Amino acid sequence: MTPLLLLMFLLVAAGGTVVVSTQDPKRQAVTLSVYGVLLALLFLLLQAPDVALSQVAVGTAVVPLMVLLAVRKVRGGKR
Amino acid sequence: MTRQVRWVVFWLGAAGFGVLAVLAMIRMPGFGSLVHPYRDLAVPLANARSTPNVVSALNFDQRALDTLIEETILLGSVVGAAALLRPSDHEREHLATEEGRTLEATRLLGYLLLPMTLMVGIDVVVHGHLTPGGGFQGGVVLATGVHLLYVAGSYRTLQKLRPLAWYRLAEALGAGAFVVLGLLGLLVAGGFLVNFLPYGTSGDLFSSGTVVLLNIAVGIEVASGVIVLLAQFLAQALTVQEIR
């Protein structure tokens, strides 16, 4: 395992911990998005560009957007 | 179910999963090892069918049935979410005239990135058999790209330039095209989802037989599906209100 790969694994583990320990769902959407980028970089380093591309599109853009829209609806549509 | 029973059920499940996971991991090949029985079988088959992107060869040729089922799951999820999120009898759609302000920088960047993102999405879909990516990845990029209209412009612009009825239709057509291509394989070559078209020259846009067509069908379905899904969420968050 190369040092770069080891660093990436540690970053992903740290990112996941940050997402889990974020309390407010609105902030969690943002940390989840950042975590998605880290995970995509790990996939890229593990030579899986296909999976990295899916991860960026779904995990970093679509899912956080859906979470944010749902939070906004639940809280009564205030800006 | 009391709290105590729930814990017992959880620990039984966790213990079972733990034992099976450890048993599975003991026999796994080492990290980064050079022995790959699946690769030795899949790569020559992909090359023989002019599909340099082996992942696409697996997804759309060697294991196309799995992909069909996955796409059906996506279709089902979108239909389910759309059914749940539609306005009920005591709700109505109303869009506030005041839409808030968009930063000039956001607007500029959004409109610059909109055509680029759409081009990248189309490129990833149609070259799915040649380069990393494919119908699913390109479809999601296309769907998110369309929503730059909302980020850079306004919800009204998005509504005007995104005729939702078309996307509902396109989603069904994309999913249907996959099945039709599969049935054509059954008719022509005697097997559902058999790669029955000529394979062509490796590296050409029109090569790899049915893989390129299945990629485009999935691209249309995923792009339309995600757009319809996000449209329901956007409508719920921005326009649907309870009638008091």
Image: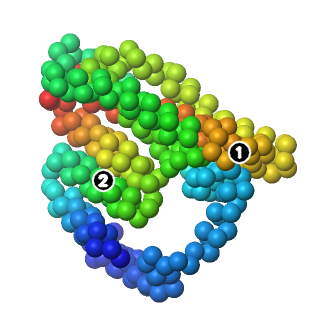
Q: Eyeballing the image, is B156 above or below A12?
A: above
Q: Nearer the viewer, residue B223 or A53?
A: A53
The amino acid beneath tag 2 is Gly
Residue A11 point in image, percent of width and height? 23, 65
Residue B90 point in image, percent of width and height? 32, 24
Residue, far top: B97
Residue B148 point in image, percent of width and height? 32, 28
Q: Nearer the viewer, residue B82 or B64?
A: B64
The amino acid beneath tag 1 is Thr
Q: Nearer the viewer, residue B57 or A30?
A: B57
- Disc 2: host chain: A
Mark 2 highlights which residue?
A36
Quadrant of the frame with the N terminus of chain B: bottom left
Mark 1 highlights which residue?
B201
Quadrant of the frame with the C terminus of chain B: top left
On screen, residue B3 versus residue B71, left or right, reads left
- Look at the numbered disc 2 and give the secondary structure of its residue: helix
On screen, residue B206 versus residue B236, left or right, reads right
Q: Nearer the viewer, residue B192 or A74?
A: B192
On screen, residue A1 versus residue B53, left or right, reads left
Residue at 22% x, 23% y is B107
- Disc 1: host chain: B
